Amino acid sequence: MHEDIKNILINEEQIKKRVQELGEQLSKEYEGKKVIMICLLKGAAYFACDLSRAMTIPVRMEFMVASSYGDSTTTSGSVAVRLDVKDDIAGLHVLLVDDIIDTGLTFARVKNLLQTKNPASIKTVAMCDKEERRMNGMEADYVGFTIPDEFVVGYGLDYAGDYRNLPYIGVLKPSVYART
């Protein structure tokens, strides 16, 4: 698995440090508010769990499944929501958490859907941001790392379901995804 990685972009210690910083920032900004973290599965699971543990305020968690990639390395342009939130989020402060904001299509689609459920507020949190690839002007409110336009895996980010469990974020060798 590690042999498929061209280089490590963000190491495990950098991730831990930044997640802790984000957790502290969010805890201060949301002190005294009813917060629900909505994790976009599957990619954001590692990040959302670590982020929730780094927060010092009560935070509920919900999960959604939405994707514009499938098993490809490029977006299909169409966002499919396959699992919606079960809890009533009306009046709650929503933190929508994803592993990466790339084109911005998934974040925008899910945020618009959640706004119809009358939350007190919605803020977006992305572990990684590829600004160069944005198609719609969508920006995350909180970002772990801004990264270059390379195909990355690890810490929840995958290629066709693989590599999520890497403890770092690395650039996948093009030869790996050129095989399929």
Image (cartoon, rainbow, N blue to C red):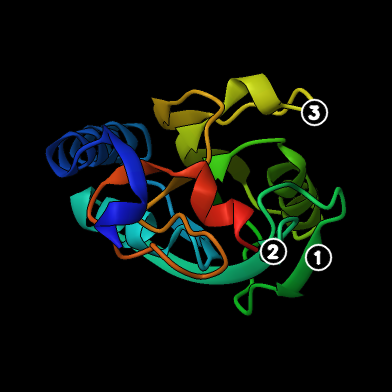
Q: Is residue 165 left or right of residue 179?
A: left
Q: Nearer the viewer, residue 62 or 169?
A: 169
Type of amino acid under label 1: Ala
Give the answer, above or below, for where 90 lies relative to 98.
Answer: below
Point 36% across, 53% down: residue = 4
Q: Label 3: how many residues lie within 10 Å, few (<14), some (14-19) or many (20+)?
A: few
On the image, the x and y values in percent for residue 87 come to 60, 76
Type of amino acid under label 2: Ala
Q: Quadrant of the N terminus?
A: bottom left
Label 3–label 2 contact, CB within 8 A: no
Label 3–label 1 contact, CB within 8 A: no
Q: Quadrant of the C terminus?
A: bottom right
At mark 1, the secondary structure is strand
Q: Is residue 12 left or right of residue 106?
A: left
On the image, the x and y values in percent for residue 157 come to 45, 54
Q: Which residue is mark 2?
A: 66
On the image, the x and y values in percent for residue 143 come to 44, 30
Q: Is residue 91 left or right of residue 113?
A: left
Can residue 92 be seen?
A: no
Type of amino acid under label 3: Met
At mark 2, the secondary structure is strand
On the image, the x and y values in percent for residue 115 come to 76, 50
Q: Earlier in the sequence, mark 1 or mark 2?
A: 2
Point 63% across, 36% down: residue = 102
Q: Which residue is mark 1?
A: 80
Q: Label 2: how many residues lie within 10 Å, few (<14), some (14-19) or many (20+)?
A: many
Point 56% across, 27% down: residue = 149
Q: Earlier in the sequence, mark 3 or mark 1?
A: 1
Give the label on residue 135, or none.
Answer: 3
- Cα gap from disc 1 to disc 2, whole angstroms: 5 Å
Give the answer, above or below, for where 126 lies relative to 155.
Answer: above
- Cα gap from disc 3 to disc 1, whole angstroms: 17 Å
